Image: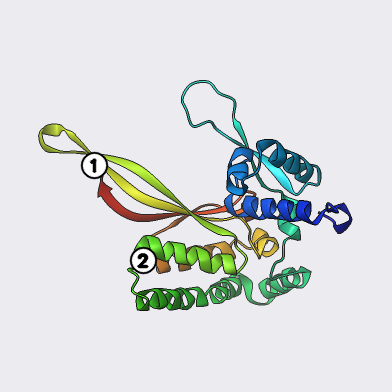
Amino acid sequence: MDSDQRPADPDLRDTRERLIEAISTHGPVTARQLAERFGLTSAAVRRHLAALLADDVIAEHEAPVARRGRGRPSKAFVLSASAHESLPGGYDQLAVLAMEELVREGGTDAVRRLADRRVADWESELESLVVDRIAQGERVTVERRVELLAELLTSRGYATTVRPLTVPLPTAGARGRSRPRTLMTAQLCHGHCPVLDVASGHPELCEAETRVISRIVGAPVQRLATLAQGAHACTTHIPLTEGRTP
């Protein structure tokens, strides 16, 4: 949103910027969820969303209804492509030109080395956070490591959240009976990518991130979607623990 388009009322401007931040971090998110998060009425939130849609700051994302049977898709919201480009990042046109020159001089191997070097300190930074928590008497589980990783990446401009998922795994028990088990997993979601323009032309950057995330959690992970490929968020599937249902 251009400065001359921003609401003149400081409180109104602050509310809209808080909404933009929440949509960036938690999107796709519905108007009802935003209203509950900020203690606003649905009507007030929808007025803000309408203005943000008109300014091309956010975009609609259709989320299927959770219940069975018929039902219209629930409207949710994510940041628009233009909003991603306007958010602060650690690169500019010079970075894109530099990558092109690197490819000409050193080929794709040089790009891979640079991609690995860019995320090389993620592991050491995460371990420092883990050591600090342990020193405070906290028990750091795999789930907690993922949460700390999300905090670290958010501080670096990724607007990262952790979304836990439970996957049922039926297995054959005694006498052929099925004993339900659950696979505990999580999705690490980046609502913003600080190197989006570069990553759009060089997926090696995304691949390097995936490799370092796998090393941090100590398990194979899978990148399900990326902003660079046009998704509303970068999503990485992370297996956690397996446990029986009650």
Residue flagged by tag 2: what amino acid is it? Gly
Residue flagged by tag 1: what amino acid is it? Pro
Q: Using residue 53 as the reference point, say whether residue 29 is left or right of it.
A: left
- Quadrant for the C terminus in the image: top left
Q: Which residue is mark 2?
A: 218
Front residue of 236/60: it is: 60
Q: Nearer the viewer, mark 2 or mark 1?
A: 1
Of the numbered discs in the image, which one, if any, rests on residue 210? none
First along the sequence among labels 2 and 1: 2
Front residue of 137/174: it is: 137
- Quadrant for the N terminus in the image: bottom right
Of the numbered discs in the image, which one, if any, rests on residue 246? 1
Q: Position of residue 230 (x, y in %)?
A: 65, 49
Residue lying furthest top:
70
Give the tally of numbered discs. 2
Q: Residue at x 73, y 68 (%)?
A: 96
